[in-house]
Each structure stands twice: as C-alpha cells, then as structure tokens.
Image: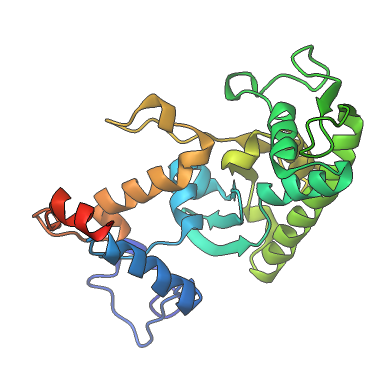
Amino acid sequence: RVDDRPVADASIGSRGAHAALDLNVVSADLLPLRQTLHVAERCQLHVRAVAPAALTSALAATTSDERAQGVIAVDFGAGTTSVAYFAHDKLVAAHVVPIGSNHLTYDLTRTLGTTLNEAERIKKSYAIDPTARRLPVSHPHFEDAFTYRPRDDSDALPKQVTRATITTTLTSRIDALLAQIGQRLERTRVPAHLFGRITLTGGGSLLPLVAERAAHVLARPVRLAPPWQADAWPHMLLQPAFATLLGLRDIALDAALGLHHAPVPVPIAAPAPMRHLRQAGG
C-alpha cells in the first residue's frame, strides 16, 4: 500500500510518503524440518525450497475462482489435518491441527476392543467409494452393520457393530477437529463472511460423516475436492489422498508461485554397485 491505498501489481511508478506491505509468515518446528531434510539428503537429493502442506494441498483442490471468492481448504490426512484460508486470492493463514483419520481408527479400537487392523477395515468399509461420494447415507450402498473380530485370537467369536455405533464414535472426534478449525478461523482476525465455502480433500475426506459435520459445525457449504486434472499424471493419483503431492508439483513448476528452479536437473549420484551392497550385508 502507498499512503494507505492498495496498489497491488501497479506499484511500479506509484508515488507517496508512506509504503506498507502485509506479509504472511508460516512457521515450523526446526527439529522435524531438519529430520525431513536429512532424509532427502540421505537419498542423494538436494532440497531447493520448503512449502507448507496446507498451501500445496489447497492449490491442488481449489480453483482460482474459489480462492478469489474466499474458501477454507481442509486436507484431512492420516496423522494431521492442514487448513488454509484464502480471501481475495491470497493466503490469509495456514494451520496444522494434530488430528487425523488415524485418530478415528484409534477411537474405534478402544470402543470395539479390537485390533488396529480390524478398526481400520471397519472405518474403510464405512467410507464410500470416491465414484459414489454423493450418495445419501440411506442409499443401499451403505451397510447397516459390520462384522469384526474383537482381538487377534482366531478362536474368538466374531461380533457385529452397527452404523449408529460407528457414527457416535467418530462424531465426537470429528467435532473436536472442526472446533479447532473454527477457533483458528477466529484468530485470523479476518471477517468470517470472506470465507464463503469449505473444500475437503485428503484421504479422510472420503468418510461421508466429515462433510456432513463440517457443514453443520462451521455453517458453510462443503465440497469434496479431489485434485484437479494434472498433465502426465496417472489417473490413480488424482485422488484426495494425493492432493499435497500434486500441489507440491504445481508449486515446483510454476515460477509465479515463488519457487525458482535451475534450468538443469538436480544431479543425483550413481547408486553403489551391487557387490558393495552384498559385502555390506554380509
């Protein structure tokens, strides 16, 4: 801004007494970041830049029109949920909530007294296929009860759990997640009416209960958003679970988003000969 007047892309040639600029800073814990960079270096890769997962998944799951009108992009992952708030096509805030779909599996494990594998199977059975995600809960596609084994013992008699029990177990955890998203929205100090809708992506978004609860708790329309079509990418990757990956690809290839890359590929050292690996393994 020049003298409190927004100049946007027309700043060159503007004149005034005072200039101001708004910056959006996304912080990260140093130790996990260093460990991630170390893993990449052990793979003989050089990291040129770091991008927040909330931004990358949002770019893959939302359109430029949605970001201009105002949108909350929620990536419901396995261990965490990343949230990005866009208004006027600008990233207003980015957060990571330490709740993911794995926590739903843990809740089912405690409620049903079964193993993690059985709880994960029940959760995935409760989820709907991406091609049928618009079906109502009352559709015959959904089962009313699921059979499971209470523990690893093969002699244990199977039990049944109803959809109502699963819904009750998952609702409390999902509502806790949405409550944290709402609290972070209030802390952005941006008028709530600037965020018109919610886009859901990530593997956990395939649970029909997530979109239903999000629309109810946050009082906004919700859209399940798989990643948009990307050139030269297999169709199997165009799923909500890979939104962060596809968004990272967009950031790396689009210089306008702030990541400038060298005109030559990043060199990767040749792998060690197999005879050295056999010697090292004894």
Task: Name the residue nearer the viewer: 115 or 228.
Answer: 115
Residue 174 in the image, given as x and y percentages of width and height = 77, 48
Residue 35 in the image, given as x and y percentages of width and height = 41, 71
Kindly identify the residue that appears in the image at 74 percent across and 61 percent down. Answer: 180
Looking at the image, which residue sits at the far bottom? 17
Q: Is residue 273 above or below residue 224?
A: below
Tell me which corner region of the image, top left, top right, bottom left or bottom right, holds residue 155: top right
Q: Is residue 75 above or below residue 205?
A: below
Task: Name the residue nearer the viewer: 142 or 84.
Answer: 142
Number of numbered tags placed on the structure image = 0
Kindly identify the residue that appears in the image at 28 percent across and 64 percent down. Answer: 42
Tell me which corner region of the image, top left, top right, bottom left or bottom right, holds residue 264: bottom left
Q: Is residue 281 above or below residue 139?
A: below
Left or right of 21: which side holds 158? right
Looking at the image, which residue sits at the far front? 282
Q: How is the image coloured?
A: rainbow
Q: Which quarter shows the N terminus? A: bottom left
Residue 140 in the image, given as x and y percentages of width and height = 79, 11
Left or right of 102: which side holds 147? right
Q: Which quarter shows the C terminus? A: bottom left
Task: Name the residue nearer the viewer: 94 or 18.
Answer: 94
Residue 131 in the image, given as x and y percentages of width and height = 58, 19
Looking at the image, which residue sits at the far left? 264
For residue 15, say whether it is visible.
Answer: yes
For residue 217, say whether it is visible.
Answer: no
Task: Name the residue nearer the viewer: 10 or 173.
Answer: 173
Q: Is residue 140 above or below residue 55?
A: above
